Image (tube, helix red, strand yellow):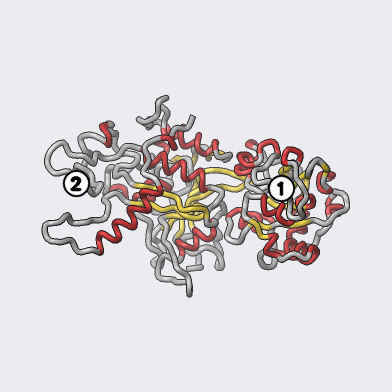
Amino acid sequence: MIKALGRRRRGITAAVSLVGVSTLAVGMAAPAGANTPVAPANPLVMGSGSNTTYSMMSALSALFNSAPGCDQLVASGTQQLNFSCASPPDSPPPGGENGYSLTYPSVNPFNAVVYQMPAYGSSNGIKQLEFSGSDTLSGVSLSEPSFARSSRAAKVSASGDKSGLNFVAYAEDAVPWFTYTKVNGKATPQSKIKKLNLTVSQLAGIYNGTTTNWSLVGGSSAPIDVFMAQNGSGTEGTWVADLGLTGAYPYGGATATATATGLPVSDFEIFENEVSQIFATGLESDAIFFFSYGKYSLLCPKGLCAGVPAKDGKGVTINAKTTVAALGEIGGITASATTIQNGTFPLDRELYNVYSDGKNANLPPVNLDAQNFISTYGFLCNPQTTTEVDPLSPSGATYRTEIDNIISANGFFPIPEGTMGDAHVTPPNFGSVPLYAQADPPPPNDQGFCQVTTTDGDTNN
């Protein structure tokens, strides 16, 4: 049973409040004899981006935040009220937070606070990183996260992601196609497709707009109503890349559907991993979409999806218990724990956290506390978590067990321990701060629970 969310938390509400308070405090002149306001000593680490990984990363952040760090209280003398450590930061304090004894290196030695901003889309979170430096976007107000959640891989090309970004994969997922086999008890045209099996080429034809009727791919005769996830979504980016779609967003299939139905094309651009907007059009019986495997397993148990309204866009009453969703096969392969983890499902993918590694002079490098959480040398990836027992766990679980349980509880799959693949990535300078945990052994033989892809050397600066 996962206990992370029930623990003492340094949560998002408190973290956001601290940002505002510290900003105001630093900018105000204190009257003579008054307290001197200072920024909080423990750092705030902001994550932004993916909808698919938002809930999972929120839970992983809570687990990290709850790890006992340095003692912030003093037994005698003047108690500081700025969250600073009672002992110098370069030496182990005599006791940990709330009386817990700490081993060193420690999971979260300086009580860093990681918080997740609401879902924004993977590519939008990455764009926040890319324009946090000297480059600007005209007319755009920008928040600067410490890292971006991403459900798509790095785009390493002249027109792809900027150089100097590390994509650290820590879990596995897939993107099958999604449809309804029954609507209010009536079989749909696509349910006639044998085993709901379509090839990548057939799916590309549907989404490029060249295949417009279910009878052309094995179903009964009816128009194919094509729905596309919002632009900037990592799930949309994965779908487009793996199908090799051409043209401009939302691509020919959604445009053809809008033309055929007389509805605006925006009606067919819906939020990833959600289905209520499909019913708003009244076209659910002929619809095709795509879905994160992990999110589907949580939101659509036994094919009964959350968000099915009482009536569709045409006022037709819907019986949610007889309106049944399904994920289709691709190339004769069903998405499953086995096919996703062994890489045989055609549209499997990894889930990432992305940060600036400091090799692009135009992008500010991430700080050590964020790297201590998300980098291949940090909490989510470090093999030391297999032996480090969480002192707050009633069952004496290790941090690795708790991390894996959170990933699995969100419908995804942990990456098994292996070569991290970060020999070419400059390690964080943890050596200057001995309290931080580090991967062991170091490159080029380091082992861990993540894999890294870097855009270092990319020509798109």
Q: Secondary structure at mark 2?
A: loop
Q: Nearer the viewer, residue 148 or 220?
A: 220
Residue 212 image point, x, y percent? 81, 59
Check the image and report above or below for 130 versus 9: below
Check the image and report above or below for 14 versus 145: above
Is residue 424 shown to the viewer in this render?
A: yes
**In-image side of 147 versus 228 (left or right):** left
Q: Earlier in the sequence, mark 1 or mark 2?
A: 2
Residue 147 image point, x, y percent? 44, 54
Q: Which residue is mark 1?
A: 178
Q: Nearer the viewer, residue 167 or 195?
A: 195
Q: Which residue is mark 2?
A: 80
Q: CA distance from mark 1 to mark 2?
A: 56 Å
Is mark 1 in CB contact (under 8 Å) with mark 2? no
Residue 37 image point, x, y percent? 22, 56
**In-image side of 194 versus 249 (left or right):** right
Residue 64 image point, x, y percent? 39, 41
**In-image side of 51 versus 279 (left or right):** left
